[in-house]
Amino acid sequence: MDGPSYYLPGVAMTIALASKTPALLRNRRDPLIRSVCALMTLAALVFCFAAPPTITEVNRATGVTNISAAVVYLLLSAFSGSCLVLITNWRGGPPETTRRLSRRWIAGYGAVCAAIVVLFVLGEAPVERVRDFDTYYANTPFLREMIVLYLIGFTVAGVAMNVMCWRWALQVRGWLRAGLLIIAFGFLLNVPFAAVKLVAVVTRWQGGDLDHLSTYVAPVLSSVGAQVCAVGFCLPLAGERLGDSWTIWSMYRRLGPLWRELRPVWAQASHEVRISWWAPARLQMTQRESDIHDGMLSLYPYFDSEVRAKAYDAAVAAGSEPVQARAEADAAMVTAAVRAREDDPEGRVISSATADAPATPTENPRDLVRMSIALRQSPVVAAAREWAAATRSESDFHERTR
């Protein structure tokens, strides 16, 4: 793998971190957000410092031969610990238990990082090795132990993450479960990464040479695993947002019949600003609900409780459940009120029943959706619409022959 193969995932992680920074600034004390940002930061640093060009530059800038190896091992170990801390906070549970587990993982991998520093200082690595440090110094005292230590720590994190994600995935559903399974698969790739590294190192101990496993195969496994894990971490959030957008657009579409039924009413109201068609779904939904409520408010004097009562009885007689029957009754009253308003736009002639105590349909979002669907599908509403039209025609006839 060359430099761009490392830098591109690092840039992607940096962009993801930048998108999370506002949330971190708003919720600095939230352990989950802190864990996410720490993981993304360490992942970006791992990809950056593991790139061969960066390894060479860091060694040259510090004047310490092969210090990049220790830096990369430190970052990998810290990244492993941050993954375990993140999954612990993400899974939740009693706050004290979550904090205790997080501290244990931090302390354990903090000790691994400290040991890596000590072992590197005690060892001797005079020859710079950009790509094959693990196998070249596999038999060097202290460096040998450092290499084995970071591989064991990485393997433990991979196995622990796999187990934790699988157990949690069995308890949840939907996007979260899919994300956890992808994360588990991504960390499963860490095991063969560490395995081929250890095989190459142990082969060196035996006097053999399988350096190509460590130099060429292991980096590919590590890169693929990290990117698969990144997809797994992002999928639940992206899926949740996609699901919210789908829910909003679905409700927006289902409110269409009611919105169109009330259009002659709300269109007369003054709207200084209309939402453009490319606006976000939530704004579109807010505009549609606002139009419906404006229409309902204008129709208030024309609502006839007698129309609703008759429509409710007809819906129940047709086999509708009480909740559905109420929605059909409200829809019938609305469609009759729209036509009554067309006949009497100034509101001069309103029946005494509605003038004394106008009826008001229930206006929470679920009832509006039921009313909208009833406007399109209910035979009771269709009958009320025909009755209102017939009444209007009869009124027009009497008016012309008077």
Image (spheres, helix red, strand yellow):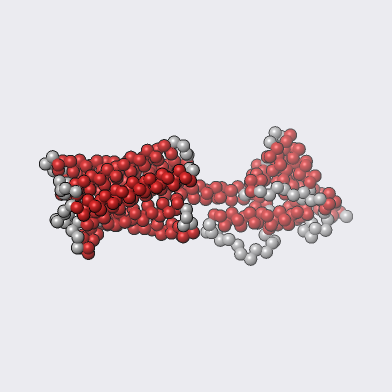
Outermost residue to the left: 207
In the rendered image, the vertical position of residue 268 relative to residue 373, given as above or below = below
Residue displayed at 70% across by 55% down: 295
Residue 389 seen by the camera = no
User: Of all residues shown, which one is farthest toward the bottom?
Assistant: 272
Nearest the viewer among 96 and 241 is 96
Task: Please state the horizontal and vertical placement of residue 287, each as a whole percent of the image.
Answer: 61, 57
Q: Nearer the viewer, residue 204 or 14?
A: 204
> Do we see residue 293 in this rendering?
yes
At a point 63% along the width and 54% down the height, the residue shown is: 289
Quarter of the image for residue 182 reads top left
Query: In the visual, does 297 lie left or right of 124?
Result: right
Question: 14 above or below 376?
Answer: below
**Picture quadrant where residue 324 is located:** top right
**Location of residue 199 in the rendering, given as x and y in whole percent from the top left corner:** 20, 40
Q: Residue furthest right?
A: 402
Name the residue: 88% across, 55% down: 402
Q: Residue at x 23, y 44 (%)?
A: 148
Query: Which sits in the foreground, 388 or 133?
Result: 133
Label count reads 0
Give the percent coordinates (x, y) of residue 146.
22, 48
Q: Is residue 130 left or right of residue 336?
A: left
Task: Provide residue 68's location: percent of width, then percent of height.
Answer: 23, 56
Name the one closer to the observer, 391 or 197: 197
* Left or right: where 328 falls relative to 196: right
